[in-house]
Amino acid sequence: MLVLGIETSCDDTAAAVWDDERGLLSNAISSQEEHIPFGGVVPELASRAHLRMALPMIERSLDEAKCTMRDLEGIAVTYGPGLVGSLLIGLSVAKALAFSLGIPLVGIHHIEGHIFAGRIEHAIEPPFIALVVSGGHTELISVSRFGVYKQLGRTRDDAAGEAFDKVAKMLKIGYPGGPLIDKLSRTGKATIDFPRAYLEQGSLDFSFSGVKSAVLRYLEKLSPETVVARLPDIAASFQRAVVDVLVDKTLQAARLVNVETIVAAGGVAANSELRRTLCQRGEQEGFRVLFPSPIFCTDNAAMIAMAGAFRLARGERSDLDLNAEPRLKLSQETGQG
Ligand code: KG4
Ligand code: ZN
């Protein structure tokens, strides 16, 4: 089955073609740069950029896949969660295409897409624990079968990626902050002991507001020159504190559910320190730890096309009145929790 995936939930306009037999045939992404001066995503600008880029990305994905619209057998589109104005652009294009081509449409939960990203390059069979860490989400999910998800923990305040972006803003190093902190950390040492929030005994929830405030308090005590001189160490120490908690709680969840496999996903899973530490510590404990390549960690449509192919093959279809759901829950989406 040849499926076109469309993803416009935040600030990346993406389209990809997945074929059940040949695998991923194309993966077109346009990352919006109009948000850089604002240090965060401006929803109105995001919608306008999606409007400009949705059709060019679809055309590019078809060209790269060497196929035409008429070859498509299904369309998968992210319908939530995300920015409503952004979601609506992808959804409207997807519905118009599905209707005019007379092919089935399926709406995909963005987080389910991230979970499927691991499957683009690796053979992954549930059960496994998914650590989904992005700009909008930090969740530990137990996947007993594809389509059946149980949330074991989540962030109580900022998402991990959001904390990276906010700390980068404090350090005045640019946006998006995750990749910049990752790069800066390579030249620094994690010598500053920022707090790790483990919350109450046994909790699999996360909280990143404490470490964020600790960085702010630390910066307030330093002169601007000292901040510049210590930037790599501050970045490395912050990153270390976040990664320690993410890794400890992911391993805790994997032991609790007694699975053999851990799959990381979402933009923060592109982080080199998280990749190294989770692989090292996970493998020491006998777990199989899988990370998608960085290009499939951040938002992309390959993961949506793949999740769509899975749901379409099960006979699932969405009606043409499918609406954008900015706060869509994963359990609500599958109806199974
Ligand atoms: O999954 P994603 O592309 O979009 C959302 O669904 O949110 O994730 C974007 C987030 C941003 O907060 C970005 O700073 C973070 O992922 N990110 C990283 C890295 N690359 C992207 N965080 C840490 N290290 C990275 N290398
Ligand atoms: Zn995402």
Image (cartoon, grey):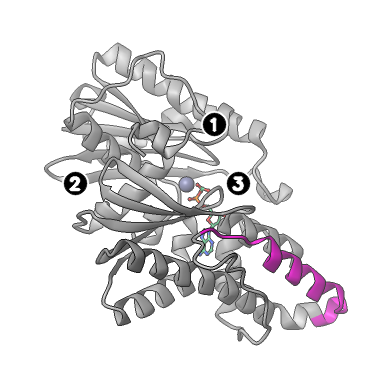
Viewer-proximal residue among 109 and 232? 109
Give the magenta part as a residue range: 205-226
Specify whether tag 1 is near ligand 1 (CB below 8 Å). Answer: no
**Quadrant of the rendered structure where residue 159 is?**
bottom right
Specify whether tag 2 is near ligand 2 (CB below 8 Å). Answer: no
| Residue 50 image point, x, y percent | 53, 32
| Residue 78 image point, x, y percent | 41, 33
The residue that disc 1 covers is: 326
Mark 3 → mark 1, Cα distance in angstroms: 22 Å
| Residue 28 image point, x, y percent | 38, 43
Viewer-side label of 2, 1: 1
Q: Secondary structure at mark 1?
A: loop
Asked if one can make out residue 302 in the rendered structure from this viewpoint, the answer is no
| Residue 208 image point, x, y percent | 63, 62
Whether residue 207 is in magenta: the answer is yes
**What amino acid is labelled 2 in the image?**
Gly
Q: Seen in the image, is 102 located left or right of residue 172?
A: left
Viewer-side label of 2, 3: 2
Who comes first in sequence, dot 2 or dot 1? Answer: 2
Image height check: is 263 above or below 310? Answer: below
Who comes first in sequence, dot 3 or dot 1? Answer: 3
Instruction: Please report the residue visible at 23 percent of the width from the left and 18 percent of the height from the top.
Output: 103
Mark 1, residues whose alpha carbon is within 10 Å: few (<14), some, or many (≥20)?
Answer: some
The residue that disc 3 covers is: 33
The residue that disc 2 covers is: 23
Mark 2 → mark 1, Cα distance in angstroms: 30 Å
Asked if one can make out residue 70 in the rendered structure from this viewpoint, the answer is yes
